[in-house]
Image (tube, rainbow, N blue to C red):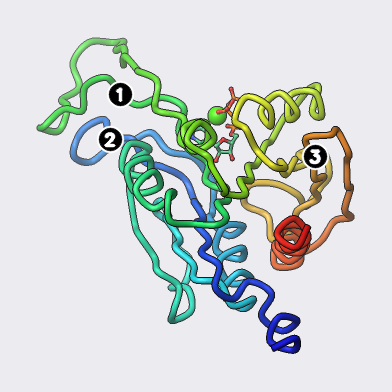
Amino acid sequence: EDQLAENLPLRNKKVLITAGPTYEAIDPVRFIGNHSSGKMGFELAAAAHAAGAEVTLISGPTHLEKPAEGIKLVRVQSAVEMFEAATASFPEVDVAIASAAVSDYRPKISATQKIKKSAETMELQLVKNPDILASLGESKQHQILIGFALETENEEENALGKLRRKNLDFIVLNSLNDAGAGFKAETNKVKLLFKDEKVKAFSLKSKKEVAQDILNEIILLINE
Ligand code: CTP
Ligand code: CA
């Protein structure tokens, strides 16, 4: 029993992870999206699965290989679809990690037919998407809730603001300033920021190693 606890520290735990970009349809063939690869979320899912957790991975469009057998993959396109899938599973889970790069806005109207070119300029009206993580934070009960942030200025202050607004246990601050870290890279350099303003800084590592560092922190919180 003790050995099981050591080898599978997340056994009997349910973990929800959002990953990848969202695609917001402009018309049947065009969308607003971003360069998120989904890699960080897929690595988190693999690490949680290896630690014995029952994992649900809600992912926007990616080119990544299918995750391991045993990981429940829910594929979505838009932020609204991701919101619906995430809020539906949240009550059942012990841990939720929002690593998706959710589009903040979507076209107000998604045309049913391919839009034809006409005038020299065109405007696209956008409306705000639901904030998935903030909504999970509002309905949070026993869950451990983790978010990500990527800032270009006042990094720690902005990330702490998100931690508070979204009712998180900790937030993973991605550094954009270091070569090799960021959206499409294989590596990441992160700081974990906690509610009490404690900061844990990590060195530049592979996303697989970063995923393990984040999971180790979650395991510490669970065993607290
Ligand atoms: N997030 C989310 N739903 C959204 C927007 C963001 O779940 N509609 C989550 C992201 O997955 C991430 C965290 O919120 O874990 C922070 O995302 P970020 O884009 O950095 O913050 P925003 O709150 O969108 O603020 P801004 O883009 O203005 O900095
Ligand atoms: Ca955003």
How far across and how far down the image is residue 171, in percent?
Answer: 71, 41
Label of residue 25 in the image: 2
Q: Label 3 vs label 1: CA separation?
A: 33 Å
Displayed quadrant of residue 167 = top right
Label of residue 193 in the image: 3
Q: Which residue is mark 1?
A: 107
How far across and how far down the image is residue 122, in percent?
Answer: 29, 12
Report helix, strand or loop for mark 1: strand
Which residue is drawn at the image coordinates 68% and 87% (left, top)? 4
**63 and 21: which one is in front?**
21
Tag in front: 3 or 2: 3
- Which amino acid, by three-letter code, is at mark 1? Pro
- Which amino acid, by three-letter code, is at mark 3? Leu
Which residue is drawn at the image coordinates 88% and 47% (left, top)? 200
- Which amino acid, by three-letter code, is at mark 2? Ala
Report helix, strand or loop for mark 2: strand
Q: Say above or below: 51 vs 43.
A: below
Mark 2 vs 1: CB contact within 8 A: yes
**131 and 89: which one is in front?**
89
Q: Earlier in the sequence, mark 3 or mark 2?
A: 2
